[in-house]
Amino acid sequence: MPRAFLDPPFGRFATGPTDSVLDVPGAGLGHATIVRDDPDPPDGGGIARTGVTVVDPGGDVWASPVPAGIAVLNGAGELTGSLQIREWGVVETPVFLTSTMQVGRVYDAACRLLMAEQPGIADSVVIPVVGECDDSWLNDPRTMHVTDADVERALSQARVSATEGADRTAMSGCVGAGSGMVCMGWKGGIGTSSRVLPDGTTVGVVLLTNFGAPHLLRMRGRAVGEAIEPPAWWATHHPEPAGSCVGVVVTDAPLDPATASRVAARVGLGLARCGSVAHHGSGEIFCCLATGLRAPRGGAPERVALLGSRLDDLFEATVDATESAVWDSLLSAATTTGRRGLTVPALPQDQLAAALERS
């Protein structure tokens, strides 16, 4: 990813060493990318530009649930398990991201994989957390492209990425669930960033970006979208803006569920900085996983939750990391041709640089 546009970091806090969710202790990020060019159904499986991304807070999440909260800016989308999170205030699984029509496949696979790891689930139940965005501009939704093996590969990669000595480079852009996504009219996908507070608390954000319109694009408060020639496909194929953005915040701060929900809501402010207005057909759904008060299943945390009066830095860091993660998704993505021969170009970085110079 070209770092020039992201230096200095958005906001006053430093990034972590990887500027990704991997900077949060124990957290992992993994992808399974599915790219195929088969004949259209019924003769073949059609064009696949899709995949699975896993955000893992680390460890056995069922045996040691993670305090969590949910926030919804615009609800034209899905995040399975969100009702349980709102009721109980914890997540019991990693967060799985995929395309809209693949949610059932990923949910089923996650159940099987997690039960194989944790036999105790069979004596209870588990509701995997699966979020989605619609990638049908580039990916054929008529075929269930995702398999159990894809979900297993993404989960395994997330687990490996969190281990000591592993490659600490977080892939973003056209990977995993981001393979077929479109952001602000340009190629989007997976974006991630981190911020470290003065007390050492780390905040990591992962976004699946699939929202917005080209003319609304903003960077560092500048209306750059008005100065960049819009992509040709937008005028001919996209009569009204719609999409979605699923945002996952992971932090080692000691947050209770109510506070985690408040942190999750701040993702929407970071999207707004980049030009999102949460269009009617777009689903902006956010969750926050906070490992600081994590305890064994049925146990009580050893730490005390942060008071509301001490949250301002955390809110600010979340907004800054979200803004950065949107741009990570845009600057890391590559021009992609998919279903029906439609090509969604990567954001032209020469025009972006010129727009920033003029504004």
Image (tube, rainbow, N blue to C red):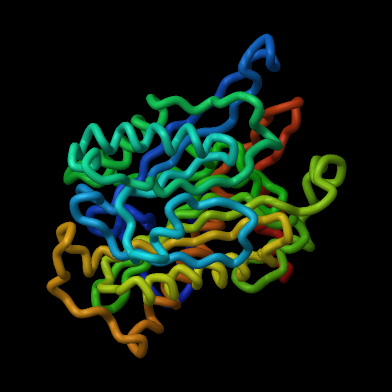
When asked about the image quadrant of residue 112, the answer is top left
Farthest residue in the front direction? 123
Q: Quadrant of the C terminus?
A: bottom right
Q: Position of residue 321 (x, y in %)?
A: 45, 65
Of residue 95 and residue 241, the one placed in the foreground of this image is 95
Point 81% across, 52% down: residue:
240
Q: Is residue 354 visible?
A: yes
Q: Is residue 175 visible?
A: no
Q: Is residue 46 above or below residue 156?
A: above
Q: Position of residue 169 (x, y in %)?
A: 34, 45
Q: Is residue 67 above or below residue 169?
A: below
Point 54% across, 41% down: residue:
178
When asked about the image quadrant of residue 149, the answer is top left
Q: Is residue 272 above or below residue 102?
A: below
Of residue 136 and residue 230, the one placed in the foreground of this image is 136
Compared across the picture, whether 340 is left or right of 93 comes to right
Compared across the picture, whether 134 is left or right of 190 comes to right
Farthest residue in the bottom direction? 309
Q: Position of residue 32 (x, y in %)?
A: 43, 32
Point 43% across, 41% down: residue:
53
Of residue 63 and residue 97, the one placed in the foreground of this image is 63
> How many dots with numbers?
0
Of residue 328 and residue 28, the one placed in the foreground of this image is 28
Point 30% across, 57% down: residue:
23
